[in-house]
Image: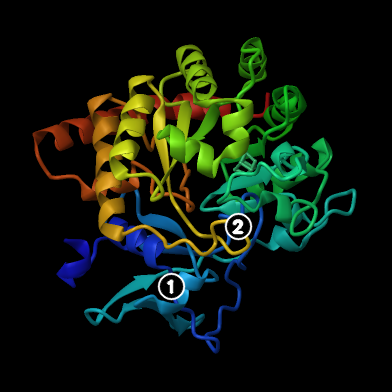
Amino acid sequence: MLEESRVRLNACELEIDLFCRGMRVPSDLRLDGARGVSRTRAGLGSGLEVVLPTRSRVKPGIWVNVPVAERFASSSPLWLWGDPDAGYRIVDDRCDASYDVKLPPEPKWYRRLTTRGVPMSQVGVLQGTYLGIYVNPVCAFWNYSPPLNCRFCTTGQNVGVNEAAEKSIADVVETCRAAREESGATFVHLNGGFQGSRGLEFVTPYVRAIKREVGMLVGVQLAPERAFDRYDQIIDAGVDHVSFCLELLDPEWFVRVCPGKARIHGQSLFIDAMAYCARRMPRGSVAGEIIAGLEPISRTFEAIDLITDLGAFPTVCIFRPTLGADLEDWPPPSAEDMRRVMEYAYDACRRHWLPIGIAPNLEVSLVVTPDDASLLAPRNASYYTYEAWRGLVRLAAAPVFKRRLRPH
Ligand code: SF4
């Protein structure tokens, strides 16, 4: 058992522990040059970006956005030690273990303005190695009275405060170009919550402009829309990835935590839209996003099965009681439960031969990816067969990504 073992953790186990326990940062610790704690998008970027080294040549580090501001982090046994010159370590008070870590530097372009005078850091932020941009107007669930926002979310408090309320296509293209050229970002994720029936229509010109002028891989995440031909349009525009935030499978938990989604969409629309896109896009291009740590984990396992049965891959967020969210006083989930969930997510991808971790230079800090979770898997014949296959797919896909990363 992870909590009882008091043994040295591998990089993925440490990642899960950090998500579930947070980390203390002594007030006098110097963090010069590190990426600041940013409260953009759904507020999940509210942590400190840290890279945990692995021994893998293919994946030399696991990126994690470590909760440091939330209340639970103040009692964490994990704390950060070091300085910018000597480097940093995470110390575990439970067993005297410590781990060398890196704090990725803040990109210089964060401090620049777009031509319209908007700070680029208020247009998009790096979350791991990819660029995240909340592109649409504030999610409409925040405009209802009383609000119908998802109870873990803080987007309505951030858009127009910590990030620009409006992002023109030119602002977004300039920020993408800076992230591509100066930070080596290959992927930009555009999200926007619930926008009625106009979200896809709104975001499509952004997708076209980024593909044409910058040549990044582009992902889109919006509440599902009933006119599925809009997904054909965004696929025609060149989108590389779409994701659907189902969040919870248990109907009662869904209504309780996501009242807007329950009232306006219903779970079936998320599933039908995901299935539609999974049939039309290359395997591994569609994701279903769920939150683990609220509903019973048996439901999380079922949700992972449902998503992978559709040919989509599971993006499993560990519930974070973000400051300012309706659920800010809820406890974070147990690390042991989350380890079981992540093992299950990797195994489901393996059983369905999903090509995970294939895109070049794409490391995600907000979630434990199935690729990260390969470190949890038992080393048996199934594991080695799948990993060898993933290696071949990565090689075969390299020229495809090279082409898709050219402006066109
Ligand atoms: S759909 Fe829910 S999680 Fe997404 S931005 Fe809106 S309130 Fe937040």
Mark number, residue 23: 1
Q: Quadrant of the C terminus?
A: top right
Q: Is residue 402 above or below residue 77?
A: above
Q: Position of residue 217 (x, y in %)?
A: 58, 33
Q: Secondary structure at mark 1?
A: loop
Q: Is residue 155 above or below residue 34?
A: above
Q: CA distance from mark 2 to mark 1?
A: 19 Å
Q: What's the residue type where badge 1 is placed?
A: Met
Quadrant location of residue 170?
top right
Q: Is residue 395 above or below residue 47?
A: above
Residue at the location (54% across, 20% down)?
A: 269
Residue at the location (28% across, 28% down)?
A: 392
Residue at the location (33% across, 21% down)?
A: 309
Q: Closer to the camera: disc 2 or disc 1?
A: 2
Tell me: is circle 2 under 8 Å from ligand 1: no
Residue labelled with disc 2: 325
Q: Position of residue 394 (x, y in %)?
A: 36, 31
Whether residue 67 is visible to the viewer of this picture, yes or no, is yes
Residue at the location (25% across, 31% down)?
A: 350
Asked whether the beta carbons under mark 2 and mark 1 sit within 8 Å of each other, the answer is: no
Q: Secondary structure at mark 2?
A: loop
Seen from the viewer's position, the closer of residues 256 and 397 is 256
Whether residue 217 is visible to the viewer of this picture, yes or no, is no
Label 1: few (<14), some (14–19) or many (≥20) C-alpha neighbours in 10 Å: many
